[in-house]
Image (cartoon, grey):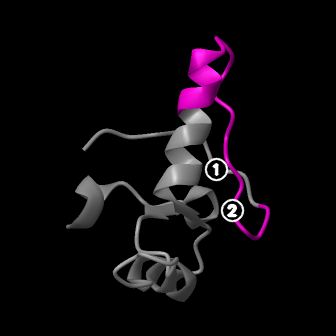
């Protein structure tokens, strides 16, 4: 049984990765995976700097947007 029986909400899901095909990246496999799954993709810099900047300013977490304009959810889970 996958995901401890919890159904995945693809409409609220997204993928964060560091292999986005940028100059210096080892590949674009993270971006390609997200695209193949139909998920919004965020590179690590965009995703985590957005959160850190917001917290440093004392504000609510500002959610980054993917290239398609979809905003990431604040519903994070610990693994």
* Residues shaded magenta: 52-69
x and y, in percent, of residue 62 in the image: 69, 33
The residue at which mark 2 appears reads as: 66
Which is the main secondary structure of the residues drawn in magenta?
A: loop
For the residue pair 76 and 11, the one nearer the viewer reads as 76
Q: In this rendering, does residue 74 appear at all? A: no
As helix, strand or loop, the secondary structure at mark 2 comes to loop
Q: Say left or right for 29 vs 69.
A: left
Residues at marks 2 and 1 touching, judged by CB atoms closer than 8 Å? yes
Q: Is residue 25 above or below residue 43?
A: below
- The question of residue 54 being in magenta is answered with yes
Where does the N terminus fall, quadrant-wise?
Answer: bottom left
x and y, in percent, of residue 7 in the image: 42, 60
The residue at which mark 1 appears reads as: 72
**Quadrant assignment, res 66:** bottom right
Q: Residue at x 45, y 84 (%)?
A: 28
As helix, strand or loop, the secondary structure at mark 1 comes to loop
Determine the residue located farthest toward the right in the rendered image. 69
x and y, in percent, of residue 42 in the image: 56, 61
Q: Say left or right for 7 vs 74.
A: left
**Quadrant assignment, res 51:** top right
Q: Is residue 17 above or below residue 73?
A: below
């Amino acid at each position: 049984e996958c995901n401890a029986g919890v159904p995945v909400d693809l409409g609220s899901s997204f993928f964060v990765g560091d292999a986005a095909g940028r100059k210096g990246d080892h590949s674009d496999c993270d971006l390609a995976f997200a695209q193949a799954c139909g998920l919004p993709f965020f590179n690590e810099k965009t995703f985590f700097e957005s959160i850190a900047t917001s917290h440093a300013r004392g504000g609510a977490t500002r959610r980054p947007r993917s290239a398609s304009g979809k905003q990431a959810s604040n519903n994070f889970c610990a693994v």
